[in-house]
Amino acid sequence: MNAVWQACPDDWETFMDVRLESLADAPDAFGSTLRGEITNTETDWRQRLTKSVVFLGSRNGKVQSIASAFPLEGDEVELTRVWTHPDARGTGLAAETVGAVLNWAKGKTVTLWVGEKNVAAERFYTKLGFERTGKRGSLPRDESIMEVEMILRPDAQPND
């Protein structure tokens, strides 16, 4: 059974655990690194949960998914930190967790960046209604990893 909820600062340890696990599992999928985040303090983790919206997803009581969003200018938000444990892929947990972010962002334009070689992730986002914008760039921390921007406009978001 899947469950998804918005994390609050008191969920900092759970957030930390799943974030570090995601960085270890998929190091080329994120702008930050395990090495860079492993030294964060409790205060750092709590603060992150106040500067972005973070949803956590669990399957059979074990937290195995994360998705976040940062407000941008105007009515835009950026979807970030999307990851699901390999054991939970294909179970619907990722779609539910990202869906919670999209519900939170209802009425706003949602953008994201995904690695060009991450075909499975791009396919996942396409199924959710995202489309490529034509923008392309390198991951700031590793210019050898190219990313493409995708967008989900408010009129393309699924209705509840």
Image (tube, helix red, strand yellow):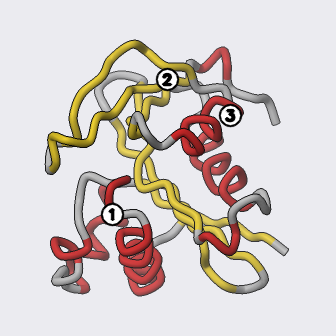
The disc, 1 or 3, on the residue closer to the chain's N-terminal end is 1
Regarding mark 1 in the picture, which secondary structure is present there?
A: helix
User: Which residue does the image show at 74% across and 70% down from the upper left?
Assistant: 3
Q: CA distance from mark 1 to mark 3?
A: 24 Å
Q: Mark 1 vs mark 3: give the one in front.
A: 1
The part of the image, by quadrant, that contains residue 73 is: top left
- The residue closer to the viewer here, 140 or 18, is 140
Amino acid type at mark 3: Leu
The image position of residue 143, as x and y in percent, is 15, 40
User: Which residue does the image show at 71% across and 33% down from the upper left?
Assistant: 127
Amino acid type at mark 1: Pro
The disc, 3 or 2, on the residue closer to the chain's N-terminal end is 3
Residue 27, label in figure: 1
Q: CA distance from mark 2 to mark 1?
A: 23 Å
The image position of residue 19, as x and y in percent, is 40, 72
Q: Mark 3 = which residue?
A: 128
Residue 159, label in figure: none
Q: Mark 2 = which residue?
A: 151
The image position of residue 59, as x and y in percent, is 74, 76
- The residue closer to the viewer here, 109 or 26, is 26
